[in-house]
Image: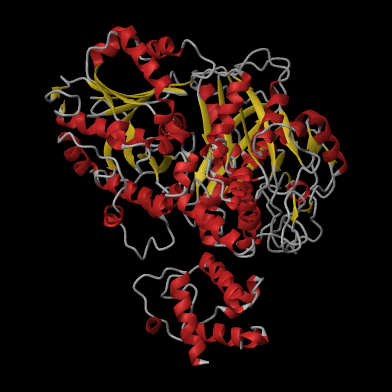
Amino acid sequence: MNELINELKVKIIETLNLIAISPGDIIDDAQLIGGDLGLDSIDVLELVMMLEKDYGVKIDSRELGVKVFASVAALADYVHHYRPEKNN
Amino acid sequence: MGIISPFGQGICDTIDSIRTATRGIKPLHLFPTVETPLPVGEISSFSSKEDVPRTHALAYAAAEEAMKKEGGPPDAVVIGVTTGGMPVTEELLKQGAVAPERYRNHSTGSIAENIAHRVGCKGPVLTVSTACSSGSAALKIALEMLRSGRVKRVLAGGVDALCKLTYYGFHSLQLVDATGAHPFDKGRRGMSVGEGAAMLLLRAAEIPPDDVLAELVGAGLSCDAYHPASPHPEGVGALHAMKEALTDACISPADVDYVHLHGTGTIDNDLAEARAVHALFGNQPLPLLSSIKGSVGHSLAAAGAIGAVVSTLSITQGIIPANTGFHDPDPGLCLTPVREPLEAKINTVLVNAFGFGGNNAALVIGRPGGREDFKAPVCAAKPRAFAILGSSCFTGAGDAGQTMKRISRGEGAGGIVPSAEILRFLSEKYVRRMKRLCRMVLSLAISACGDTTMTKPPASVFFGTGWGGLSETHDFLTKLFASNERFTSPTDFVGSVHNAAAGHVAIHLKATGPNVTMTGGDCSFEQALLSASLLTRNSDDPLLVIGADEYHEKLSPLFDASVAQAGVPADGGGALCLMPVTSTSPLQIYPSFFSYTGNNGKCITELINALGGRERINDEFGAVLAGIPAAQREKGEGQLSKFLSLTGYPHPVIDYRRFVGEFASASAVAAILAVSFLKAGEIPGNVCHQGSVSLQGKGVLVMGFGNYITAVEIRP
């Protein structure tokens, strides 16, 4: 799981062009959206595309998004459970 | 009036469909998709035999109908559009087509220009791209042109055609309802992307003539200055635009019989609009309300103009269209629109249209002579001049100072603006989601404001760009095609709209006044300045007028024939911080002439007259900065030499594109150079193949030649 969390942090930084932020700066349980990273709804949608493309995980409602993007830990948990078998 | 939408082609079909509450939303048929096609507002019966993009063909259909009964050409054409030639361009890019000729109709400005050519217009031809409020913004500009007395008849409206960019773009933002739009319904999940066109011929008249259908009595523009793609949650900007429109029409909310709502069907838009409507009407009972986007989808730039036509039909036919798709009231909205087509006598309609970048517009349409207390519009003698408070520019040389230095040495300042220069006023973290054009424009705006001593920030932003955010457009389509049309970037979609940059400026400066982006090719900057002078009639606040274009390695040579011809990459832009002119203003700027030359053999004479005649030109202007796009050089040089021989112009003439390079908004840089020359009191040596030339207290004319002739006066 830790490996997935770190992998997701790297992908988040790359996808959202987060300048001067390293994976170590993203705290596993900290609020991901609207928190210190300055991420908003467009960033969420950009991550939704990345998750579908790289992990085969679909997030197609705002209600689900709120849960999934609560923190990197929550995101990793969701990806871990819902990614298609072949990717595990 | 002319209209084409999923309601049908023409006024008669539209009336029939409104009466029967036809739901024109069906699964996409226009192009194949990998996944199940989403419901859209497609005009399935429409196809054109002409070799033009669908957007152009739709616009012609509406314009032809609008002009059917008119005896002569309009004095001006103003078109709101966002997609331009994209339906063709995206297919060509997908195929990898590399012949620039095939992209000749890509530009948004080509629609207005082609219409002007067909209808024989000789005057101003303008293109507005304020996303989904473009059509309404076009009507507002047309209204102010009529009020200014500059023109008597204007053809204005909006158009957009379905294309992959908008279909996949809105889908990537999760703003599309997979069951079709249900505006204001409790279970609404989003919009249905649509297409259409509507054009209105507006005539100036103190007393409405007998054959008139309705009066455009007022209009208001505002900006949320809140978020690039989401509306202000309380609908603050929407409310502001509606209030401005009512004030402009000299009426109160109680006078409104029907509100033609924007109502796209997205959760946030409908909530923000409902809150704005409640705030506008306060404790009064709400008037009749409906959105037609559950019937026809959201036709983007056409929406406001279609709203204006449908609202005019409400007045002439006494019918309110149904808010199709509305079943269960949403307790969060407390708003019940008209469920079935309703017959009612309607005198006054408020028409809403809101777009990305927080660009809001509202129109007031009234029964001709239906209300005695409609006051005749205030006629200004002419569009206003502005005092120049501050300026900034970017060229391949860097900022204004570096550009002047380079030019003074007799070297060119063309080339690509260094990225480090653009980032000088910006934090990379703050602009992480912005690409080249947005960064350049924001940086220009900050720098122009920093060049002034004023304490009040600009309230409104007028931006001209020939091509918009090419990086975002390219990256969006590249990602889309690389993934077999499965994945794309919502950030790039939001950044690809032409008004994205001006939206960022507004957010940064909290500029909640009009936010207008003009996209008329090589004279986009002049169009922005002209719009500013028309639209800030009643305001004493500072404003920004900006022109900028980015060079994109792949797209610029395909889209811009002048760039292709020059073969040398160049980009840049300029920004002016302005105020309404006062007696103590050290420098002034005034847009004095704008004409489409396609139908006008007499435009040089008209130009000289507009500038006050030969004597005034020679006495008051110590230099001409002449802009001749490379692709129109022969035509432009002919016009310039005719101008020079007719006036016997004795002062230096500077062919500035040879110094700053070929890009659509090079004239914005020319304006800033003119300001620098005037501040120095002279034109540096090397610029005009002689030693430095004193301006002797005279002004400078920034002129454009080619398919359009423009003149901007900058003087002490």
The quarter of the picture where the N terminus of chain B appears is top right
- Look at 70% across and 48% down and name the residue there: B194
- Look at 70% across and 25% down and name the residue there: B64
- Residue B405 is situated, as x and y percent measured from the top left of the image, at 16, 39
Pick the front one: B389 or B124: B124
**Residue B158 visible within the image:** yes
- Look at 50% across and 23% down and name the residue there: B124
Q: Residue furthest bottom?
A: A1
Side of B19 where B218 appears, left or right: left
- Residue B56 is situated, as x and y percent measured from the top left of the image, at 64, 34
- Look at 63% across and 78% down and name the residue there: A57
Is residue B664 placed above or below A10 in the rendered structure? above
Is residue B716 placed above or below A27 in the rendered structure? above
**Residue B510 visible within the image:** no
Count how many numbered circles sit on residues in the image: 0
Q: Residue furthest left?
A: B691
**Residue B608 picture quarter:** top left
- Residue B387 is situated, as x and y percent measured from the top left of the image, at 30, 31
The quarter of the picture where the C terminus of chain B appears is top left
**Residue B617 picture quarter:** top left
Side of B414 where B677 appears, left or right: left
Pick the front one: B476 or A60: B476
Tell me the colour scheme of the image: secondary structure
- Residue B636 is situated, as x and y percent measured from the top left of the image, at 40, 21
